Image (tube, helix red, strand yellow):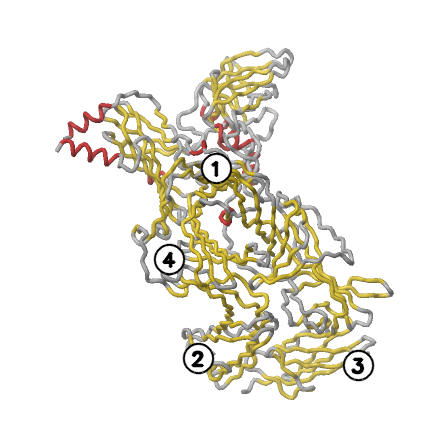
Amino acid sequence: MLFTARCLWLALLAPAAYPADSSLSITIYTDDLALVQERRDIDVKGGRQRIEFEGVSAQIRPETVSLTAGDISIVEQNFDFDLLTPAKLMEKAVGREVTIVRVNPATGAETREQAEVLAANGGVVLKIGQRIEVLRDDGLPVRVIFDKVPDNLRARPTLSVTIDAAHAGTRPASLSYLTPGLGWNADYVALYNEADGKIDVQGWITLTNSSGTTYESAQTLLVAGSPRQAGSPGQQFGSPPNGWHPPGRRPTLEQAGTESGSRERLGDFYLYPLAERTTIANLQTKQVGFLDVHGVPAEHGYEFQNHWLGTSDQPQSAKSTYRFSTSAHAGLGDQLPAGILRFYMRDKRGEPQFIGESRIDHTPMGSTLSLATGDAFDVKVKAVVDKRTRIDERDWKTDMRYELSNALPRPVAVTLRQDGLWGDSRISAESEKSTRLSADTAEWTVSVPANGRTVLTASFDTRF
Amino acid sequence: MAARRLRWLLVSSAASIAGLVLPAPSESQNSIPDAQTDAPSAVSVTLYRDPYRASGSIMLDRLNGFALITETRAVHLKVGDQRLRFEGVADGIEPESAILTGLEDGSLEKNRDAAVLSPSALVAAAVGKPLVLARTNPRTGRVERVSGTVESDAQGGVIFKSEQGIEALRCSGLPETLSFEGTAGLRSHPTLSVRVRSRRELSATLTLSYLARGFDWAADYTATLATDGRSMDLGAWITLANGNGTGFPEAHTQVVAGRVNRENGEVEPIDVGGPIVATCWPRGSTSDIPMQLQFALAGADALKKRGVMNYSAVAPMAAALREVSPPRAQQEQLGDLKLYRIPEPTTLASRQSKQVRLMDRAAIPVAVVYGLELEASENPHVGGAMPASRYLRTMNTDANHLGIPLPSGHIQVFAYRQGRRLLERESNLRDLARDEQVEIDLGPSSDVQVGATSTGRRHRIEISNARAAAIAFELKLRLPDGMRLADANPAPGTKNGRPIFTLHIPPRSVGVVSYRTSSSP
């Protein structure tokens, strides 16, 4: 019984997975937030004392610090952010004695004197014996030597904890805190093979550290999500919530998946642990691979969306799109953390060249993604409002003409969308059959011959 | 149970220190050895335009395009963990885009360190570590070396602690300097490194590719109109520029036309460091009236400059335009983009712009058209005439000796006058595909003026031609929703859903358009 109890206590302080001396684990969320947990052996004397922690994040959120160790109680936790500078040093020396050393510019001889600092406002006023002098008023060299650094001035903001220990001795302690300045996202590289319409995809986790501190040999866990509530402290102003698209941004997730993988979760967030301990240096960008799949079928297409009453004198390029699945049998077979997917394609010499990129949100397994990489040089659409007729007081008839041109030596199919059809509107005539994606949007799939043109016309009856 | 717990804790001996400071964990991973890498054997640079510029030329002080840089180099690996350092990558590197191929076991991790070696970085790295302060006596020249530690470098002021006490660097007026032990692992440029693990000793050829900012390119066209004005010669240069501090010697160079999507992700800032500013306490003297509070302004300025990539040192663009210059860039299809390959390897030096011939086509038939667009229902220019615009039009077809993709850029139109080739107009071109109409804006013409008069719903538009030749004129009208034209003379056509009047106006005469606007259905 007694033996069991002792083992339990050991397990609480130093679980088997961590060596007892010094171990650091970092959990990084996607929204510029990280949880740092450290286990160190601390050596304390009995009674009240102050412990300073070096090497914690320079951007630490001091209110989140928690220190636990055996047989100690925390009296108070302090975060000193008054920095040690020459001006501060002089300010804190007001009313105290300093040593001044004058160097004679003619002989080089040194003279030492004791002086009391009377003031440090704009200039330093000293009392030397019964004389009052302004420091270096004559411009001659004078060294000022202080005997100690004031207590709460530090080179870096410093965390200190005052503890009351029941007895002296070394004991393991664990420290945890939250800090901004550490973040991660995913980066994907997709190489599209035009001949067989397949992509090879590599996924990389990209970690960035601008917290001002280097984390040595840390066990790192990445969480695809943010535990922060909107508007909570430290939330960056203007950072959009997950899945929010700025106006005009094209949605990428065509169909959300319903497959679950073997990946571990925290709540509804997926976890991506790094396989090995790693050192995350300050101002470092670090990448570790997590996905490598080959030969995933991808469908290349063209897309053009016209806004309601959108009309132009010049042809506009259609968007070049790639569509693929993330399902386990015919796709990438993993949950994709949010990030940027960069597309490459081999040129005539076989060298991979960049052809555009697109941002994706956290994507469940089994989803269909449709990503736009840029504008097609050769496939263009000119949408024209041909005629707008007032039928009666409330009703309008709008004749649209879409001229699609293709300068490629092969036929293409363009997905053409007309939006802004909300409310009571219908298509009274059209040269090709449309499908209504929603009350707002009609879609046509228009084939355009090689080096040719196709004209599509449609009439809309609307109340506006 | 509680007693047992206490006893166990007491087993470890107690050595109590007053102001206990816990050291940071040991620097274990810095001890990974560097593997030997050779200099790059082949470099390829593919430039992409500023994705937000639809037409026009590049600006050397605002190179918002980017490049894909691919380099090949040999490495020699030992057994175990090691670090491959890639020196000389572009400063504008987007580290998250780096791809490394050719390693049989793959890489453990890729790192980009943005902390670079600078005086301020040296001091920052030396805080709390032993170093030497050298102080020179100005009279005797004797150098006094004091061992101690830097206590702080906060806000640009350096506090030094030695056996003598605590002092602030360079506040005494004596020449003082710090000498450091080692460079704390910092390098002069941001470095990209890869941690790899090899099971055996081997030599491998690695290919590293990455995207980097601070590049751009555009096409610069020169059109020369024939004396009769019915045809033109069209030539073009590819103007490309590298705004990075890194040069690419003997690089295979390509440019890509077409707009590619870019997510405007933030690039981690580079800490470019700064001088040791050694700010002091207030140094006002009795002769300073009024009292000036001199705070650490110098330090604040140095901080402001951090993280800014400065391209201001770019040399002005060479305006040389030679008439004939093979070799030309060769075009190929890259997905939905156009890739132009510069046929010979070329050196793309740092902060340099370069021009390579793109095309030369002669005797392209063109038409000069005058035109203006007006609101149909209101008098556009009360009390006076306004000049019409002049356009140069052609079709990008084989029959017109063109029929090639024309990447966006800038165009200069020249015409011969009295045997001299003079610049007539500068304009911009967007991306033009094969078989698309090419329209070059030649600017307003003072010889062709348009005046409009309105009486109620009746409108009369007069176009005066002061030229010695007949002109073709196009009047385009903008109609508000539900409005239509009636009693129009001459009969209008329709272009892009709008009424258009096409007129042939003889030399030195006036063409007239009249119509009525009507809102009834």
- Distance from Cα at disc 3 to Cα at disc 1: 86 Å
- Distance from Cα at disc 2 to Cα at disc 4: 41 Å
What residue is rendered at 60% in x and 21% in y?
B175
The reply to whether label 1 and label 2 mark residues of one chain is no
Left or right: residue B417 versus residue A49 is right
Callout 2: chain: A
Tell me the SS state at disc 3: loop
The reply to whether label 4 and label 1 mark residues of one chain is no
Question: Which numbered mark, 2 or 4, is in the foreground of this view?
Answer: 4
Q: Is residue A62 above or below residue B455?
A: above
Looking at the image, tell me whether mark 3 or mark 1 is earlier in sequence order.
1
Question: Which numbered mark, 4 or 1, is in the foreground of this view?
Answer: 1
Three-letter code for the amino acid on which mark 1 is drawn: Glu
Residue assigned mark 1? B201
What residue is rendered at 35% in x and 23% in y?
B19
The reply to whether label 3 and label 4 mark residues of one chain is no
The answer, for residue B386, to whether it is visible in the render is no
The reply to whether label 3 and label 1 mark residues of one chain is yes
Residue assigned mark 2? A425
Three-letter code for the amino acid on which mark 4 is drawn: Gly
Looking at the image, tell me whether mark 2 or mark 4 is earlier in sequence order.
4
Residue assigned mark 3? B506
Three-letter code for the amino acid on which mark 2 is drawn: Ser
Q: Dot 4: few (<14), some (14–19), or many (≥20) neighbours within 10 Å?
A: many
Residue A298 location, x and y as percent?
46, 63
What residue is rendered at 37% in x and 56% in y?
A334
The part of the image, by quadrant, that contains residue B275 is top right
The answer, for residue A264, to whether it is visible in the render is yes
Q: Dot 3: few (<14), some (14–19), or many (≥20) neighbours within 10 Å?
A: some
Residue assigned mark 4? A333
Question: Which numbered mark, 3 or 4, is in the foreground of this view?
Answer: 4
- Distance from Cα at disc 3 to Cα at disc 2: 49 Å
